[in-house]
């Protein structure tokens, strides 16, 4: 789980964001702006980064009621292997996926991500889990996420290939996983994919 002070900082930031969106009294707005500044200073110190970087992470600050973002990940399991893509941003590996985009369902988002990151057209077979990112051992993040995981099946007659968004796309054996991009994917995400791929009656996990 993430550090408690990181949780406090994100919660204060969310309260300030919603408060600034709805507040009409100037004195209330000033109070929420002060809370936002304190929260961002906390997050910047915890992450050891400039406060401007924290400001830039929350693109929708004060533009509505603050809610978690949604990250979608797709797993293709073939026998004892799982498909991972190498991220250009950090050179590490992850299940294909990313931010859910407005206007697309969760399944359509996964189809889009698999095509954009591994060159595959897929059918989405089932949701196998929903995680609150802060409750697992991902790298700490100033943003708040729910992560949705889906099992996918590639359509026939295709080859895995890297794209403009990834440098490699490879099927890895279960016991030979490469270094993972831990802000995106952790070992338990991959293990869960294998578990659900071999047990069609297993209920989806959530926290």
Image (cartoon, helix red, strand yellow):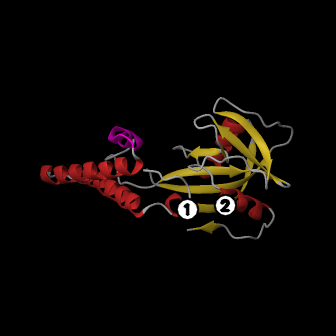
- Residue name at image x 72 percent, y 33 percent: 162
Tally the numbered discs.
Answer: 2
Residue 28 place in picture, x, y as percent: 17, 54
Q: Residue at x 32, y 48 (%)?
A: 40
Q: Residue 191: say if magenta.
A: no
Q: Quadrant of residue 130?
A: bottom right
Residue 1 disc label: none
Local SS, label 1:
loop
Q: Position of residue 23 (x, y in %)?
A: 21, 53
Mark 2, other Cα within 10 Å: few <14 / some 14–19 / many ≥20: few
**Mark 1 vs 2, N-terminal side:** 1
Question: x and y percent of residue 52 in the render?
Answer: 34, 38
Q: Which mark is residue 188?
A: 2
For residue 139, side relative to residue 166 (left or right): left
* Distance (Cα) linking label 1 and label 2: 9 Å
Provide the residue designation for mark 1.
136
Question: In the shown orientation, is residue 166 left or right of residue 153?
Answer: left
Q: Is residue 120 visible?
A: no
Q: Nearer the viewer, residue 102 or 166?
A: 166
The image shows residue 164, relative to residue 199, as above or below, that is above
Q: Nearer the viewer, residue 35 or 65?
A: 35
Residues marked 1 and 2 touching at CB (< 8 Å): yes
Q: Is residue 142 above or below residue 164?
A: below
Front residue of 21/143: it is 143
* Prevailing SS of the magenta stretch: helix
Residue at 38% across, 39% down: 53
Give the quadrant of the C terminus: bottom right
Q: Which segment is the magenta one?
A: 49-58
Residue found farthest to the top = 164
Image coordinates for residue 194, horizontal then vertical, percent: 76, 60
Where residue 55 sits, quadrant-wise, is top left
Q: Is residue 127 visible?
A: yes
């Amino acid at each position: 789980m993430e550090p408690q002070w990181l949780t406090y900082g994100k919660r204060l930031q969310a309260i300030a964001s919603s408060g600034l969106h709805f507040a009409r009294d100037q004195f209330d707005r000033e109070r929420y702006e002060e809370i936002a500044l304190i929260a961002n200073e906390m997050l910047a110190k915890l992450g050891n980064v400039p406060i401007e970087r924290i400001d830039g992470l929350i693109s929708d600050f004060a533009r509505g009621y603050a809610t978690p973002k949604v990250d979608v990940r797709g797993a293709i399991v073939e026998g004892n292997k799982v498909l991972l893509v190498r991220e250009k941003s950090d050179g590490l590996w992850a299940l294909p996926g990313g931010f859910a985009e407005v206007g697309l369902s969760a399944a359509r988002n996964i189809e889009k991500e698999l095509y954009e990151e591994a060159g595959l057209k897929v059918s989405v077979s089932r949701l196998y889990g929903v995680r609150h990112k802060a409750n697992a051992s991902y790298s700490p993040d100033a943003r708040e996420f729910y992560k949705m995981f889906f099992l996918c099946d590639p359509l026939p007659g295709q080859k895995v290939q890297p794209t403009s968004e990834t440098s490699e796309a490879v099927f890895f054996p279960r016991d030979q996983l490469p270094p993972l991009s831990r802000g995106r994917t952790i070992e338990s995400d991959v293990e869960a994919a294998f578990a659900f791929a071999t047990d069609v009656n297993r209920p989806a996990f959530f926290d």
